Amino acid sequence: MFYHFVWYFFIFAFIGWCAEVGYAAVVTKKFVNRGFLLGPYCPIYGFGIGLIYLLSVPFEKNLLVLWLGSIVVTSGIELITGFAMDKLFHNKWWDYSDFPLNIGGYICLPFSLLWGFACVAVVKLIFPLTNGLIDLIPYPVGIILASILSALLLSDAVISVITALGLNKKLERMDRLAKKLEVQAQKFTDTVTRAVQNAA
């Protein structure tokens, strides 16, 4: 089961990245890498669908429980991931602030319900197909490929985190410099103002 989880992670991380990039291209009319990482994958999609795969087995035939469970799982992942990345890197990779019933812009009820329906569709329609495709890969070959993909993902994550933290430090230094310049400018303005008042 873990073997399939790993493959679901990479498959849907890539599909999620394609969906995000496609949506951004329609909105902005240009290519935008919507992922945090450099490569063509959004791990939040892969982890979310992989977790749904593991948890859906006992509830696959109960659509209501599957739908509710999918809402809880996907919303929890979005909330925790969005909050953590916002606090660590001072940036939001998605923002639901303009949608009703949102929590900090990290999750909102309309999209949570949508993720629930999407997960049910994936479990009932996509999983049977992808299970068959994964099983077509010889197991030893699948292990090697999954190991290579995992190593690439880990390297990408390390580089992306280092880059993001370095950029944040530069932005913080620039912010401190701007505040110092603002203080000096205010002092100069006050000095000129007093000089003019004394002259008057």
Image (spheres, rainbow, N blue to C red):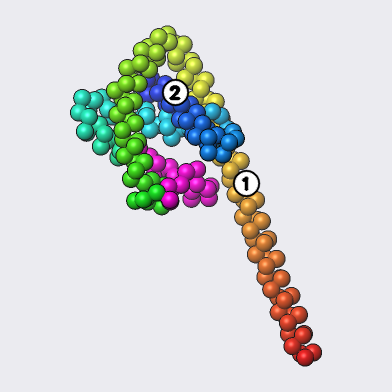
Position of the N terminus, as image quadrant, is: top left
Q: Residues within 10 Å of mark 1 (few under 14, many from 20)?
A: few
Where residue 29 appears, as percent x and y from the top left, is: 58, 36
Mark 2 or mark 1, earlier in chain: 2
In this rendering, the label closer to the viewer, 2 or 1: 2
Give the residue at mark 2.
Answer: 11
Whether residue 31 is visible, yes or no, is yes
Q: Which residue is mark 1?
A: 167
Q: Is residue 54 left or right of residue 185?
A: left
Task: Check contact, mark 2 vs mark 1: CB within 8 A.
Answer: no
Q: Is residue 136 above or below residue 80?
A: above
Q: Quadrant of residue 7?
A: top left
Q: Which residues are magenta?
A: 74-98
Main SS of the magenta part reads: helix
Within-10-Å neighbours for mark 2: few <14, some 14–19, many 20+: some
The residue nearer to you, when weighing 186 against 166, is 186
58 relative position to 161: left or right: left
Amino acid type, mark 2: Ile
Q: Quadrant of residue 28?
A: top right
Q: Position of residue 137 (x, y in %)?
A: 43, 10
- Residue positioned 21% across, 33% down in the render: 64
- Extreme residue in the right direction: 199
Q: Residue at x 25, y 31 (%)?
A: 66
Name the residue: 40% across, 23% down: 8
Please state if 103 lies on the left or on the right of 172 as rendered.
left
Give me the residue at 41% from left, 52% from top.
104
Residue situated in front as seen by the camera: 30 or 74 = 30
> Which dot marks residue 9?
none
- Say above or below: 191 vs 116: below
Amino acid tagged 1: Leu
